[in-house]
Amino acid sequence: MAEQNRILLLAHGSSDQRWCDTFEKLARPTLSAIPQSAVAYMELSEPSLEQEVARAARDGVTHVTVLPLFLAAGRHLRRDVPAMLADYRSRYNIEIELAPPIGEDAALGEAIRSVVEKQLTGTTTLDA
Amino acid sequence: MAEQNRILLLAHGSSDQRWCDTFEKLARPTLSAIPQSAVAYMELSEPSLEQEVARAARDGVTHVTVLPLFLAAGRHLRRDVPAMLADYRSRYNIEIELAPPIGEDAALGEAIRSVVEKQLTGTTTLDA
């Protein structure tokens, strides 16, 4: 039986492969832990968001959650992505929910604090 | 005595105040835990990176670490920010180190996984 829900981790995309490499690495813990998750790109890189929505529809998935790997919502998340999703919903006949960007979750603020603390420890270690 | 090291959390900036609100919230755990940290914006918002570097110099700080609140390094972090920092180093006579963007730290990938798991739990809870 096909899974009913799929999670698409939405990254912006770039013509620079190093950009995508970073997002693929960021997604790795999620992809390992959650089999029904995948990465998709808004523009410039593949797989595109549309390709992944189409694949979900082909796989018989009924509900897609798009989780933006963005720290904050700008023009893309307030305007462009909702317009893309409205189009895909009708063309692929699938439910698609747009989650808030990851940066709105408290886990991100805590992760940033831990990065800064590591930076400071690194500096301190140089003195030892 | 002035602290010797200051951490500037560098966000992109936007004409949309909601964008800045999200970054200020993201920075809050760091600002609470680490008194010598502050937020600075690359463009469009204040305090600007230059204003914060100037303030550090006025405060007698000798070393600034700029930690980009960016998930990946694109054109801004590969080209624009290094050029800005080269300018500020000579004009303010202060050491400035540019750290990798937060998205290159493993803590961010783990935070993303935890956000996705919360999303899924939310979905499951609806069935209860």
Image (cartoon, coloured by chain):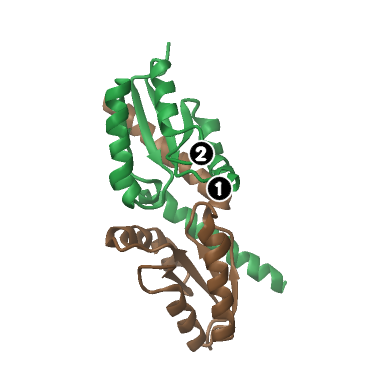
Chain colours: A green, B brown
Q: Position of residue B127 (x, y in %)?
A: 28, 23
Amino acid tagged 2: Ser
Asked whether residue B98 appears in the rendered view, the answer is yes
Q: In the drawing, what numbered circle is on residue B121?
A: none
Whether A94 is drawn above or below B20: the answer is above
Q: Where is residue A42 in the image (x, y as percent from the top left)?
A: 42, 40
Could you tell me which chain the residue with mark 2 belongs to?
A
Viewer-side residue, A39 vs B114: A39
Left or right, A83 with respect to B31, comes to left
Could you tell me which chain the residue with mark 1 belongs to?
A
Residue beneath label 2, please? A45
Residue at 64 percent of width and 69 percent of height: A123
Whether B33 is drawn above or below A2: the answer is below
Q: Position of residue A17 (x, y in %)?
A: 59, 44
Circle nearer the N terminus (2, 1): 1
Left or right, A89 with respect to A12, comes to left
Whether B30 is drawn above or below B63: the answer is above
Whether B43 is drawn above or below A46: the answer is below
Q: Give the mark toward the camera: 2 or 1.
A: 2
Amino acid tagged 1: Trp
Residue at 54 percent of width and 45 percent of height: A15
SS of the residue under disc 2: loop
Label 1 neighbour load within 10 Å: few <14, some 14-19, many 20+: some
Give me the C-alpha separation between circle 2 and circle 1: 10 Å
Viewer-side residue, A92 vs A33: A92
Residue beneath label 1, please? A19
Asked whether residue B128 appears in the rendered view, the answer is no
When asked about the image quadrant of residue A7, the answer is top left
SS of the residue under disc 1: helix
